[in-house]
Image (cartoon, grey):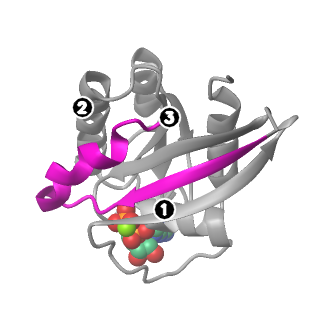
Amino acid sequence: GHNNLNAKLVLLGDMGAGKSSLLLLFVKGHFLEFQESTIGAAFFSHTLAVNDATVKFEIWDTAGQERYHILAPMYYRGAAAAIIVYDITSADSFALAKKWVQELQKQGNPNMVMALAGNKADLEDRRSVPAEEARIYAEDNGLFFMETSAKTALNVNEIFYEIAKRLPRA
Ligand code: GDP
Ligand code: MG
């Protein structure tokens, strides 16, 4: 019906930040301590019911390595939404997340719903990116921000629901 929406979503961020783990938890409901690295990119689809609508996410999980960067536009072009993932224990991964945000602001769909995910929130004792710093960055750049954990499931469904709610309705 008219309340059913298909939405292309792309996951971007440093290798090892937890993109595949967040997606695996969202789509299949489990976490792997030794998640295999993504080669190139992987595709998943998953449907959510939000209020009176269903949103079918068509999700591209990208690899994150620099050598695959050239392929990234294939995945974010035309995407309705992006989740940019960093690891709260890695300042480098946060710096890289900001670069992805800049690239999407320049090259992506101007109406794209963008979420910033500070993942591995379970590793508080190894934190190197203050939540407040990321929150302010996100606010200044028009993204919404959540800290997540694919290990404890913190905010994993929530971030996808929040995106679904923000997608423009036809
Ligand atoms: P990707 O390269 O961004 O897809 O990252 P992966 O999903 O492959 O995860 C990299 C490693 O971090 C794997 O060993 C995961 O088990 C681990 N990992 C992912 N998310 C979390 C998390 O939220 N907490 C913890 N403690 N480990 C995580
Ligand atoms: Mg991966």
Disc 3 from disc 2: Cα separation: 15 Å
Mark 1 residue element: loop
Highlighted range, magenta: 54-79
Residue drawn 50% across the image and 54% down it: 59
Which mark is in front, 3 or 2? 3
Between 71 and 154, the one nearer to me in the picture: 71
Give the side of residue 71 with respect to residue 157, left or right.
Answer: left
Compared to residue 94, the image places residue 154 above or below, namely: below
Query: Could you say which disc has been placed on residue 123 in the image?
Result: 1
User: Left or right: where does residue 26 sit relative to residue 85?
Assistant: right
Furthest residue toward front: 1
In the displayed orientation, state which residue is furthest to the right: 52
Quarter of the image where one finds residue 166 = top right
Q: Pointer 2: residues within 10 angstroms few (<14), some, or many (20+)?
A: few
Image quadrant in which the N terminus is located: top right
Which residue bears the numbered disc 3?
80
The CB of the residue at mark 1 lies under 8 Å from ligand 1: yes
Amino acid type, residue under disc 1 in the picture:
Leu
Q: Which residue is mark 2?
A: 103
Q: Nearer the viewer, residue 5 or 127?
A: 5
